[in-house]
């Protein structure tokens, strides 16, 4: 697939979309499992935009239960969590938006129903190596976030579009979370211009930041203390930090969905570090989060060794081995990438 594929730049694709959108279509918006600020923000932002256009038959369906820390967002209470009772809505939909993912497996139990649905499927995403289950793609691997793409898409469709305050808060949330608070490489002048326009629509940055990051239950901070104190390892000879957390440990700290979010970034705050990895055991499976700085691609690394993928500096993977075996496997791979890790500027 080409690196940039904007369907609205193709007149006939825009036309086929507008035809589907005319009248009172039934629209489903879905996003990846374990949704983050960008998945949620782009979906809710799009929903508010469509509703402002009089398209009020819009249903948001999450493949899995969303984390607590997203529930303050405008419209969040209307998000449905997938179960069989939603099958008909998906099967009968005219349009299905698939946001912030482009690999069908990230829909979990919803996957087959979405892929087989008769709807026009529109994929809006910025992850590498998209699969071809969609009909139309608005896809740019260089975009900071799906929220950036939704903003650009709205402006492509309707240059004079006015974005409501609620939509602005949602889109700003995804910009903020996917750029690591406006610091990752994808934080371009264009991203700040979008943020500026969202502020003009009424976003209060301190409020969004506090809702996202200063809204923790005490146990989550105790859990963070435990992980940093007992679980964080650093290998200066590779410039690699890693943490492995067992299911029992997650339970001991009453850890909820989302409590491990952001934990992996802690490893990158160590001076000189290049890569940070978090292994978590959940329902017998090992989930792995990778982060890097500079040119070392954790997307390639996850794809090659841990059945995963994502972005150059932020990716995920999984393993069917035990937690200890997974960590062992990871450690034995480090000598192969040592030269590349050491060559990164600090
Ligand atoms: Mn994203």
Image (tube, rainbow, N blue to C red):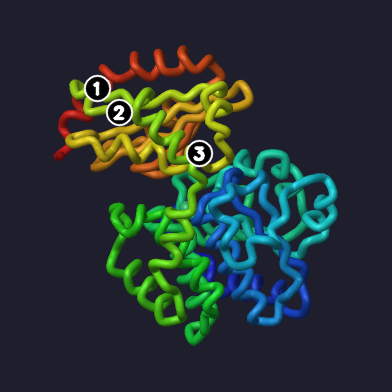
N-term-proximal mark, 1 vs 2: 1
Q: Which residue is mark 2?
A: 241
N-term-proximal mark, 3 vs 1: 3
Q: Which mark is residue 235?
A: 1
| Residue drawn at the location 70% of the way across and 74% of the way down | 21
Q: Quadrant of the C terminus?
A: top left
Mark 2: C-beta under 8 Å from nearest atom of ligand 1: no
| Residue drawn at the location 47% of the way across and 44% of the way down | 129
In the displayed orientation, state which residue is furthest to the front: 218
* Residue 133 picture location, percent across and down: 63, 48
Mark 1 near mark 2, Cβ–Cβ under 8 Å?
Answer: yes
* Residue 84 picture location, percent across and down: 83, 45
Q: Secondary structure at mark 3?
A: helix
Q: Give the alpha-carbon distance from disc 2 to disc 3, as whole Å.
A: 24 Å
The answer to whether any part of residue 120 appears in the image is no
Side of 164 where 277 appears, left or right:
left
Mark 1 surroundings: few (<14), some (14-19) or many (≥20) residues within 10 A:
few
In the displayed orientation, state which residue is furthest to the bottom: 160
Residue 91 vertical position relative to residue 205 in the rendered view, above or below: above
């Amino acid at each position: 697939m080409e690196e940039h594929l904007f369907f609205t730049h193709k007149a006939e694709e825009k036309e086929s979309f507008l035809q589907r959108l005319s009248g009172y279509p039934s629209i489903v918006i879905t996003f990846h499992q374990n949704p983050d600020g960008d998945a949620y923000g782009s979906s809710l932002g799009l929903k508010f935009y469509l509703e402002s256009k009089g398209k009020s038959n819009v249903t948001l369906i999450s493949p899995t239960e969303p984390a607590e820390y997203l529930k303050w967002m405008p419209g969040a209470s209307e998000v449905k969590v997938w179960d069989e009772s939603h099958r008909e809505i998906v099967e009968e939909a005219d349009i299905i938006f698939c946001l912030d993912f482009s690999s069908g497996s990230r829909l979990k139990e919803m996957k087959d129903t979405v892929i087989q649905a008769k709807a026009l499927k529109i994929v809006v995403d910025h992850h590498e190596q998209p699969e071809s289950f969609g009909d139309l793609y608005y896809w740019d691997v260089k975009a900071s976030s799906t929220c950036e793409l939704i903003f650009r898409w709205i402006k492509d469709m309707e240059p004079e579009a006015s974005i409501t305050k609620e939509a602005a808060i949602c889109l700003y949330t995804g910009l903020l979370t996917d750029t690591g608070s406006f610091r990752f490489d994808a934080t371009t002048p264009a991203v700040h211009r979008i943020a500026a326009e969202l502020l003009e629509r009424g976003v209060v940055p301190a409020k969004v930041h506090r809702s996202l990051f200063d809204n923790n239950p005490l146990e989550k901070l105790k859990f963070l203390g435990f992980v940093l104190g007992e679980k964080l390892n650093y290998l200066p000879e590779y410039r690699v930090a890693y943490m492995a957390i067992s299911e029992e440990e997650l339970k001991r700290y009453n850890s909820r969905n989302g409590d491990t979010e952001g934990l992996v970034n802690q490893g990158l705050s160590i001076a000189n570090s290049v890569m940070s990895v978090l292994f978590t055991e959940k329902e017998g499976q090992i989930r792995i989060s990778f982060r890097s700085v500079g040119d070392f691609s954790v997307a390639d690394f996850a794809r090659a060794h841990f059945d995963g993928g994502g972005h150059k500096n932020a990716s995920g993977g999984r393993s069917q081995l035990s937690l200890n075996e997974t960590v062992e496997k990871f450690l034995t791979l480090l000598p192969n990438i040592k030269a590349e890790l050491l060559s990164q500027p600090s």
